[in-house]
Amino acid sequence: MKKIISEKFHIIILLITILFIAFCFIQENLWVKRMLKNPKYTIGKATTDWHQKNNNGVGTDYKYQVNDKVYFKTTNCSYKKGDKFLVIFDSIKPKNATVLGIYSIENYLIDLKPPAKGWKYQDVPFNIDSNMIKKYVQD
């Protein structure tokens, strides 16, 4: 048995790698589907400028708040510290969220305060497009 394992080790490693990638892909799709099934919206604020991170690539750190809990994440969108933007999150699991880089918070909306539980789609105080959001999040 040990001989078979040692002879086929590279095939076993390749198979494990392929299964791991497939698992990650499926998990990502499930996460996105759940978020799109129960979406709410809030405003995120960049806590850093766009930067290189030691082990996580590049991005902008940001925070958003839901039900008096502050969440911290990193987006691949390029922002400056203090910039505000629209965030979509899963109303059941608010830690599952993503920045909607296709929508910026215009100057006249800077002081806008979202409700503690976030906005429902129809309550967002500026125009957004659900089809465009779905495509953006799924890509």
Image (spheres, helix red, strand yellow):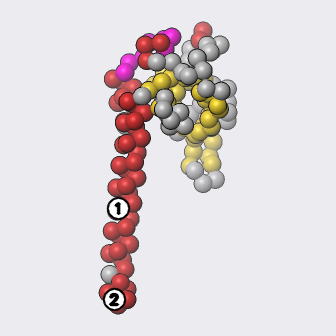
Q: Which of marks 1 and 2 is in front?
A: 2
The image position of residue 136, as x and y in percent, is 39, 31
Vertical side of 118 occupied by 6: above or below: below
Q: Residue at x 33, y 23 (%)?
A: 131
Please tell me whether mark 1 sits on a helix, a strand or a loop: helix
Local packing at callout 2 (Cα closer than 10 Å; few below 14, some 14-19, many 20+) is few
Most foreground residue, 94 or 88: 94
The residue lying at 54 percent from left, 21 percent from top is: 118
Q: How far apart are marks 1 and 2 (CA)?
A: 23 Å
Q: In this view, does 132 lie to the left or right of 123?
A: left
Q: Where is residue 84 in the image (x, y as percent from the top left)?
A: 60, 23
* Residue 87 seen anywhere in this rendered image of the structure: yes
Q: In which quarter of the image is residue 18?
A: bottom left
Q: Mark 1 or 2 closer to N-term?
A: 2
Relative placement, left or right, of 71 versus 93 is right
Note whether 132 is above or below 4 in the view shown: above
Quadrant position of the C terminus in the picture: top left
Picture quadrant where residue 83 is located: top right
Q: Quadrant of residue 138?
A: top left
Identify the element where label 2 is drawn.
loop
What residue does disc 2 label? 1
| Residue at x 37%, y 80% (from the top left corner) | 9
Q: What residue type is labelled 2?
A: Met
Q: In which quarter of the image is the N terminus?
A: bottom left
Q: Give the range drawn in magenta.
A: 124-130
Callout 1 amino acid:
Leu
Q: Residue 97 in magenta?
A: no
Q: Residue 19 carries which label?
A: 1
Q: In this view, does 41 lie to the left or right of 48?
A: left
**Dominant secondary-structure state across the stretch colored magenta:** loop
User: Percent from the top left, x then y, of residue 134?
Assistant: 36, 28
